[in-house]
Structures are given as C-alpha cells and as structure tokens.
Image: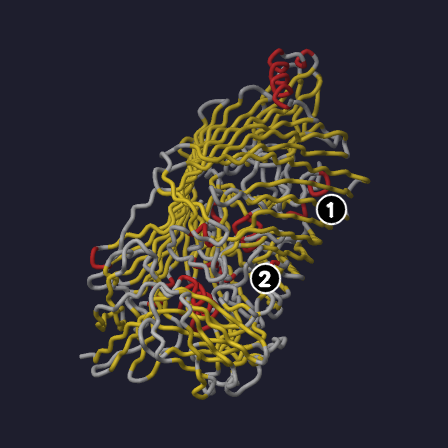
C-alpha cells in the first residue's frame, strides 16, 4: 500500500486564484520573567503572491503597564523590533501592552504564569527500524495542582528550528516531565540550546492553532489574538529557562 | 392512543373474529439452489396487482377471503411459481424459487408476473437496494469489490474522496450514517484509511440504503441507514471459493450442517501490502495489513423457530518496526431468534454486541506507553410484524442500547513519567419504542406511517464528570454513583412517507422524518480517520436532531426496463458539533470543553436514470446540492459551507454482457470540488510565515473526474467448479486529481509562497482470479 502510494502519488506547484486580504499589522509581544530585555516586533501583512521581505513598522508607540502601575516604554532598535530593559517581569502580575500604529490603538493583557525552571537537558539517539531517532529532553519538575503550558525554541549549531513545539502537563501534573523534543539529525559535537518557556493557556491555544494551520490536516482558521483593535499577533507573558549542551 | 389500538388488534386477531370470513396463507420463500431466504419476494393472486412481500427473513403472510386461488410467487431474475390453493383455513406454504440464470440466457426466458416496478409503488422514498452479485461486474480500485464505493455512485451519496474513509449522504457528516451488519452497528466501515471497506462482498446477500427518510423501526443517526445483510450459507451443498489479487486475497467456506435445516458461512480476507515492503530496505520492518473474518450460523428449530448467529471481526495494523504501532478494528456479534406466533404474527428478537477500538503505542529502550480508545455497545431489540391484511402490515417493537465509551486511556511504564489514571467508561442508555403501519389505502396510494419514541439517559460511572462554562473551562467536577441516572433526553420522531401512482408506471412520493442522534464523532482533521473521537450525548452535549422533507417523481418506461427518479430534499439539523479554535483534542479527558455546537441545513436535487435489464445495463446519477453550518465561535458566527459541500456530482455506470463468458464495464465520475479554506494573505510570526484566512470553506478544490474500466472473463462454469478473471483499470486517462492543496514557502526562496497540489493515484491496474468449488 505504502509502496503504491509513494510510487504513484505526485506533487506539483499550481496557480490558485486567491482573494487579497485587507492589509493589517502583526504585533508579536513578549514580557519575560526577570530583569532582562523584552521584545516587541511589529510587521505588516502581504498578499499571498507578493514576494520579498515582510514590511516592518518602525514608527509605532509601544508601552507596557502592570496592575501595580509600573510602566515602561519600548524603543525602536531597527527592523520593526522594539526593546525594553530595566523593567523586571514578575510572576502573578497582569501586564497590558499598548501599541499605536498609524493613529490606531491596539492593546492586550496577560498575567504572568508560574515560572518553571528546566532541571537538566540531555540528548539521545535510538534506532527505529532502519532509521535513527534523535531527541533532546528538557527535564523539569512540573508544579502539582495547576495547569502548566510549555513552549520550546531549539537552536542547533546556531540555527533556530522552524515550527512551533508545545507541551502541556495534562498527563504529568506534579511529576518530573521527560517528554522529548525531536531533532532532525544529531552528530557528535553538535551544540544544542533549548529555551523552555512557561506560557499561559491563551498563548498555548494561540500557538496550537498556528500549529494546526501549518500541518494541513485540519481546517485552518486565524488563531484568537489577545489584542483588541483588530490586529494579528499575540502578547505573551512568559518565563524562559535555557540550557545548552554539546552532544558527545 | 396508539397502544390501545395495538392491544385491540392483537386481542381481535386472537379471538379470530376475521377468521370467520378469511384465512391466511403464510410461509417462507427461499432460493432453491442454496436455501437463502429471499427478501422482497412478491406473493399475490394471479392477475391482480396488490399482494404482500417477504420480510428480511423471507417470511410472508397473505390474508384473503376463503376460497380457491392461484397464487403467484415471484422475484426479479427468478422464475415465477404458481400454486393452486384452496384457502378454507390457515395454511403454510414454503416455496423455493429458481434463479433464471441457471443454465439459460436471461433474454430467452419469459418472465411472467410483475417486472420490478417497486421504485414506483413503494412508498419508501430515498431508499436504494444493492445486490452484491450485480456489483461484481463494476471496476474498483485494486480490484476490491466494495459495496460502500458502489453506493457512492448513487444520487445523494458522496464519497469522501481518495484516501478518505466514510461517505456523506444528503449533506450529512460521515458519522451520521448508521451502518448495520446483520443489525450490529459498525463504527468504522473502512480499512486502511478508506481504500477498502470492511464488507467482504462474498459474505453479503443484500444491502439497503435509506437516505434520511428511514421508517420508524430504524433510528439513531440523522442522515442514513445502511442495512447490510449477510448470506446464511448454502444449506444444500458445500462451496469453497475465493479470490487471489495483487494486494489482497479472500476465502469463503459455506455449506449445510443439516441439509435444509442448518448452514454455516465463514469468509475471511487479508491484505499483504507489507509483503512488498519487506522487499525494500527502508520499509522492511514495517507492518501494513488488515484482515477480516465473517462467520454465520443458522439453525431451523422447527416450523416456527429459527436461530441465527453472526459475527464479524476485523483489524487494521500499521507499524514501524518495534517502536511505533497503531491498530484498530471492529468486532460485532449478533444472536437472533425468529418466532412465528401465528400465520399473521412474526417476531424477531436480537441480542447484539458491537465494539470498535483503536490503540496507538510507542516503545523505545526504556519508555513504553499506549493510548487506547474504545466504544462498546450491548443491544437488545425486539420487533413484531403483524400482517393484518393486504392493506396493513404493522411493525412495532423496542430497541435498547447500553453504550460504554473510553477515550484516551493511557497506559505507560514508570520510565515515561506519566500520571496514569484508569478511566471508567462513560455510560449512556439509549432506548426506543416504535410503531409503524405499511398501509395500502388503495391500489395506487401507499403510505408508510410510523412514530419512534426515543430517549437517552446519561449515567454516572463512579468517576469524575465535568461541566464547562461558555469559555470551555471546567465549571464543576462531580463524582456520581456508578449506574445512577443523571439526565434523560426524550424525543418523538414522526416518520411518514407516501407514494401515489398517478398513472401506471408513474408516481409522486413525499416524506417527512425526524431523526435523533445520540452518538457523534468529532474530527480535528479534514479527512475522517479511525482515530476520530466518538462522543455520546452527555451533561454537556445535546443530541443531534434532523428534520428532513423530501418529494419525488418516479417513472418507469418500456415495461419497467428504464427508470427515471427525480427527488428533492431539505434537511434542517440541530446540535452539530465542531472544535473550538486552537482546541486541545489529543487524549484530553476534558474534551467536551473544546466543543462548540450549532445548526446546519442541507438541500438538493437528485436525478437517476437507470436501465435495469437486457445485455446493456447501467445508470446515470446527478446531484445538485448544498450543505452549510452555522456555529457560534466559528466563521464569525456566520453560515459557512460544510467541508463536504459539493455542488455538482455526476456518476455514469455502464455494464455490458458481451456474451455468457465476457462482460465489460465502465465508470465515469465527475464532481466539483469540496469547500475548502484557502489563505488570503500572509504574515510573519516568530520568524515563520503564516497565512491569513478570511471566510471558512469559502473556496473550492479543483474539479475531480476519472474513468475506470473493468472486464470480467467467466472462464469456467461446470457442476463442480467455477472460475473467472477480473481486470480493472482505475483512472484510465491518469488525471491528476487533487488530494490536497498545501500552501508553503518556496524551498529555494523563503520570501516567496506557493500552492502545491498532491495527487494520490494516477493509472492503477489490478487483476484478480476468482474461484469456487461447488
């Protein structure tokens, strides 16, 4: 069956007549736990058949305030990226990000979830039929009694992995989680860095919808943004725990 | 009100008030060569037009004023039998009809009596009957005869497309079809993701498809009932037969246990696609196969009693080495008892078990875990059929099903770090009582009128049960005592249909039905798959309800050689389910919080033109239709096309018997594309390109069309042995039909995005050798 499928199926690039979407802006906002640099990136959408890089918005006004009244203003550092430092993110506080672009205001609120640190990181390879599976495991102790959501960024030899990786604790609540992250390949002396983010449920739902859209398996739909005002994108308050290893 | 009428009738017939003037002839009609009961054989007075037909077990009962008659027993493609009877008291007469094709050319024999004009007279509309033997001539992919694929060639029935299991009837979803194998529901009716059906045609006698206006003795699904009946097994002589094909083979053994009284049938089928995989290096440790087994046993205890036992077991297995595997399958078992109370009262009692489960497992050096889901039904059914007269046949009875569903039961060893919770099955108890009358008001006006009262009770199971708020978060968590009754939904489902023959050979029909569905399947993917979750009505989910109205015009031409059927329907649906945006649908104990519900509507026009007899037979079927949904939380709360919405659907089927040894067939299918969601723009997020979508299912896939050829060579046919070769070519002109269209960034230039179409099959030939030892 599979042989017939592989020898018989074929793919080709085709032309599809698509309507143009009305132009919109995309805000990727983040406030992290701790005294670190927070980033907001603002870009514009394009029509499907346009090519070239996505246009950036370089003249937006980006501010953040928490529920205790502490505020900060992001400064544009180039390429549509805005940064804010000396504004420590704290677990439990509710942050509201406000962005003004071309006279329109967009804002989103998010409460900083519990920060879960990564205890250790290790990489393994196992045989799988004629192939080999390679993966890294970001081991951590999951807090019991609360729902925890995790997102990962994997960097291998300086290159960031495409795609979204998410995990929840629905099967592991309160345990040491050893759910692996799969790697395309792994060689001795590879440097692997994993950033593990403790994210909110709304962020998990948003990224899960983006993931569903990109697998082509389910009916795609625009993920639910937490911004009011009608822009795309998401404001994520999250904690980051990173570890790096060199595979031996 | 109806109960009173019921008791009155039974009381009166017991008193034999009518017997003073009338008497009844009853009995069984079967096939002379193998003893199989014939469903729908006609028994009537010679030269008259009314009469009665045999039921699902070949039983008939005809009540007439006392006197002498010539009674004719007939069935299409069988030689009529006439019997002179002196009806002065109740008599029984069992009749064996001989098939016309036994040793003679069909054309040569004059078939007296009525040619099939059932399509004009039968008040039931939207019902199709398929004869598995007739299907044997049609070309199919990989040479596998498939009753479900053939049904998809009829108007109103749409296939899920290549690589998709399931089918859609009149705009309904794939889970809205009740598929019964000897009365047991089959939850997953396809193997290997839709390429093969679970029905081995060697084991089947008859199949009926009701497209939504099913009579009151059926219930439980909104869009259709596919009633498939297995053969009993030849009770005259032993047969061993089968077929050997490129991808799969099948074997069947049948014969009498006690001639004329008892017989058995066992058929099996297995694919061996993975045998070819073993020849490759990359895939040699992979498993990919399915098998199924049908068994049947029947025993006639005496003149009034007959017992039947049937079972089905099938499994699909996919595996990658020792590390990963997924398998799934159905198991059904039915025990039935026919009892003839009197010449007018027939009953059938059935005890049915049906289950479907799938298991997904991963095993590495130290970690081992599996996720299993299972649905199990235990079902008791009892039905009386009371033949009051030629004008009234009543059917009444009850149906009780206990459903138990476990979704996402995780089992793991300690190294996996899971919290494993043993889930108790969710239990629901579904009950129905029904009453219907097949009422012949006059020779030209027939009605099937009935009502079904159904209920579903949600039960406690000693485990946590959740309710949710509108946002999908858990609102309450309660543990209810095992087997306690928590909430009951009750419905009345009226079912009415009529046929009115305006002039001989032409009729108008109409029907209205309400159907309730307590068990629904939710899919997170565009193609239905065996791992989609089955859910019952619960504290959070309400049952699906549909109201369907249909009208039609039916005409037979040239002595019933040609048939033209035009039907139109409108169906309104409630409580249709779909997932929220970004839903967590994997092994989620709190899955119901991820569901949204809304309404649906579907309407269409179906045209069928058919040539039923002669050397050249076939049909043209065309459907024009629309099906939409409206669910708050999806598509900005507006109406949107359901994924299976397909505007035009055309099938042309032609079969030609060149001579007694050779027959050819051709099949042409054309349909406009399904509704699909395509992007309108794009943006960047976290360094990746994603797409902007406007309306849901607002675009169309490209048109689909293909031509298939088939050829059957009947090589040998002697007293002891029969053999034939079937050759089929799927997609003769190799059209690249779109299986999916994906949007992605260009591999060479990440700043460009493109659309890529995947095609599954171009030209696929197949050869099968069929044999039978008699």
| Pick the front one: A44 or B157 | A44
Vertical placement of residue B327 versus A236, above or below: above
Q: In this figure, which residue is indicated by the disc labeled 2?
A: B635
* Residue at image location 36% in from the left, 52% down from the top: B408
Taking the image as drawn, is residue B720 in sight?
yes
Answer with mark 1 or mark 2, whichever residue precedes in sequence: 1
Q: Where residue B2 sits: x, y (%)?
A: 64, 23
Give the secondary structure at mark 1.
strand
Q: Is residue A51 left or right of residue B564?
A: left
* Residue at image location 45% in from the left, 85% down from the top: A76
Q: In this figure, which residue is indicated by the disc labeled 1?
A: B552
Q: Where residue B52 sits: x, y (%)?
A: 66, 30
Q: Where residue B247 sits: x, y (%)?
A: 42, 62
| Pick the front one: B498 or B55 | B498
Kindly identify which numbered label has been placed on residue B700.
none
Give the secondary structure at mark 2.
helix
Q: Spatial distance from mark 1 to mark 2, Cα to Cα?
A: 34 Å
Among all residues in the image, which is located at the extreme right? Answer: B503
Taking the image as drawn, is residue B737 in sight?
no
Vertical placement of residue B114 versus B421, above or below: above
Chain bearing mark 1: B
Residue count near mark 2 (Cα–Cα under 10 Å), binned few <14, some 14–19, many ≥20? some
Chain bearing mark 2: B
* Image quadrant containing the N terminus of chain B: top right
* Quadrant of res B414: bottom left
Among all residues in the image, which is located at the extreme front? Answer: A69
């Amino acid at each position: 069956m599979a042989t017939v499928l592989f020898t018989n199926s074929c793919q080709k690039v085709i032309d599809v007549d698509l309507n143009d979407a009305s132009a919109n802006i995309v805000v990727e906002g983040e406030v992290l736990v701790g005294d670190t640099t927070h980033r907001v990136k603002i870009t514009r959408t394009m029509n499907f058949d346009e090519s070239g890089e996505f246009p950036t918005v370089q003249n937006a006004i980006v501010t953040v305030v928490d529920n205790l009244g502490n505020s900060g203003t992001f400064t544009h550092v180039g390429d549509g990226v805005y940064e804010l430092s000396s504004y420590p993110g704290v677990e439990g506080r509710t942050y509201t990000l406000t962005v003004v672009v071309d006279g329109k205001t967009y804002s989103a609120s998010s409460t900083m979830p519990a920060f879960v640190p990564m205890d250790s990181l290790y990489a393994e390879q196992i045989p799988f039929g004629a192939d080999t599976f390679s993966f890294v495991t970001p081991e951590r102790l999951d807090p019991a009694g609360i729902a925890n959501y995790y997102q990962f960024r994997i960097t291998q030899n300086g290159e960031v992995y495409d795609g979204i990786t998410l995990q929840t604790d629905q099967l592991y609540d309160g345990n040491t989680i050893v759910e692996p992250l799969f790697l395309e390949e792994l060689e001795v002396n590879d440097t692997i860095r994993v950033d593990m983010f403790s994210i909110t449920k709304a962020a998990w739902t948003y990224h899960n919808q983006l993931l569903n859209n990109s697998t082509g398996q389910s009916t795609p739909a625009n993920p639910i943004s937490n911004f009011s005002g009608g822009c795309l994108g998401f404001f994520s308050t999250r904690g980051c725990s990173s570890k790096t290893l060199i595979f031996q | 009100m109806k109960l009173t009428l019921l008791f009155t009738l039974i009381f009166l017939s017991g008193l034999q008030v009518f017997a003073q003037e009338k008497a009844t002839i009853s009995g069984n009609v079967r096939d002379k060569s193998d003893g199989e009961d014939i469903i729908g054989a006609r028994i009537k007075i010679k030269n008259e037009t009314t009469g009665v037909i045999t039921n699902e077990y070949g039983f008939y009962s005809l009540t007439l004023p006392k006197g002498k008659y010539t009674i004719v027993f007939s069935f299409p493609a069988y030689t009529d039998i006439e019997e002179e009877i002196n009806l002065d008291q109740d008599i029984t007469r069992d009749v064996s009809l001989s098939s016309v094709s036994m040793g003679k050319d069909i054309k040569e024999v004059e078939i007296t009596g009525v040619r099939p004009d059932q399509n004009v007279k039968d008040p039931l509309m939207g019902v199709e009957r398929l004869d598995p033997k007739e299907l044997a001539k049609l070309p199919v992919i990989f040479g596998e005869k498939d009753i479900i694929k053939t049904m998809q060639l009829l108007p109103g029935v749409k296939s899920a497309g290549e690589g998709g299991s399931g089918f859609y009837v009149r705009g309904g979803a794939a889970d809205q079809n009740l598929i019964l194998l000897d009365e047991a529901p089959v939850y997953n009716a396809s193997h290997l993701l839709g390429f093969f059906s679970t029905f081995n045609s060697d084991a089947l006698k008859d199949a009926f498809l009701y497209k939504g206006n099913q009579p009151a003795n059926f219930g439980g699904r909104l869009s259709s009932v596919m009633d498939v009946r297995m053969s009993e097994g030849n009770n005259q002589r032993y047969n061993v037969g089968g077929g050997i094909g490129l991808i799969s083979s099948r074997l069947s053994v049948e014969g009498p246990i006690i001639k004329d009284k008892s017989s058995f049938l066992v058929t099996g089928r297995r694919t061996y696609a993975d045998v070819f995989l073993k020849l490759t290096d990359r895939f040699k440790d992979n498993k990919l196969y399915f098998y199924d087994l049908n068994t049947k046993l029947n025993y006639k205890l005496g003149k009034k009693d007959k017992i039947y036992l049937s079972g089905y077991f099938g499994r699909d297995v996919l595996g990658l080495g020792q590390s990963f595997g997924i398998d799934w399958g159905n198991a059904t078992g039915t025990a039935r008892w026919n009892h003839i109370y009197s010449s007018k009262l027939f009953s059938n009692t059935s005890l049915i078990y049906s289950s479907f489960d799938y298991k997904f497992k991963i095993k590495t050096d130290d970690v081992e875990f599996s996720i299993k889901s299972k649905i199990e039904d235990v079902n008791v059914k009892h039905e009386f059929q009371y033949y009051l007269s030629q004008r009234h046949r009543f059917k009444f009875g009850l149906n009780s099903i206990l459903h138990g569903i476990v979704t996402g039961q995780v089992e793991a060893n300690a190294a996996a770090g899971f919290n494993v919770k043993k889930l108790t099955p969710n239990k629901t108890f579904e009950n129905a009582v029904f009453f219907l009358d097949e009422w012949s008001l006059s020779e030209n006006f027939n009605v099937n009128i009935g009502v079904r009262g159904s209920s579903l009770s949600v039960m406690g199971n000693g485990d946590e049960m959740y309710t949710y708020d509108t946002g999908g978060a858990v609102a309450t968590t309660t543990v209810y005592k095992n087997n306690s009754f928590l909430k009951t939904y009750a419905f009345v489902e009226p079912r009415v249909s009529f046929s009115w023959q305006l002039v001989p050979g032409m009729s108008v029909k109409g029907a209205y039905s309400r159907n309730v569905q307590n068990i629904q399947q939710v899919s997170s993917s565009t193609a239905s798959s065996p791992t989609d979750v089955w859910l019952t009505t619960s504290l959070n989910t309400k049952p699906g309800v549909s109201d369907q109205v249909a009208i039609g015009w039916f005409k037979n031409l040239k002595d019933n050689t040609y048939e033209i059927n035009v039907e139109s329907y409108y169906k309104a649906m409630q409580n249709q389910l779909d997932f929220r945006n970004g839903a967590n649908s994997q092994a989620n104990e709190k899955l119901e919080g991820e569901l949204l519900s809304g309404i649906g509507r579907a309407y269409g026009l179906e045209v069928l033109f058919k040539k039923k007899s002669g050397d050249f037979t076939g049909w043209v079927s065309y459907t024009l239709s629309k099906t939409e949904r409206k669910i708050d939380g999806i598509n900005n709360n507006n109406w949107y096309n359901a994924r299976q919405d397909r505007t035009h659907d055309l099938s042309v089927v032609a079969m030609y018997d060149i001579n007694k040894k050779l027959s050819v067939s051709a099949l042409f299918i054309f349909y406009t594309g399904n509704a699909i969601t395509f992007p309108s723009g794009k943006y960047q997020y976290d360094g990746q390109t994603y797409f902007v979508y406007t309306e849901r299912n607002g675009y169309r896939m490209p048109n689909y069309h293909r031509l298939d050829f088939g050829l059957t060579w009947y090589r040998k046919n002697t007293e002891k042995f029969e053999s034939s070769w079937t050759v089929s070519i799927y997609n003769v002109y190799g059209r690249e039909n779109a299986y999916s269209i994906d949007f992605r960034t260009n591999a060479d230039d990440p700043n460009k995005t493109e659309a890529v179409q995947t095609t599954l099959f171009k030209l696929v030939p197949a050869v099968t050798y069929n044999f039978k030892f008699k």
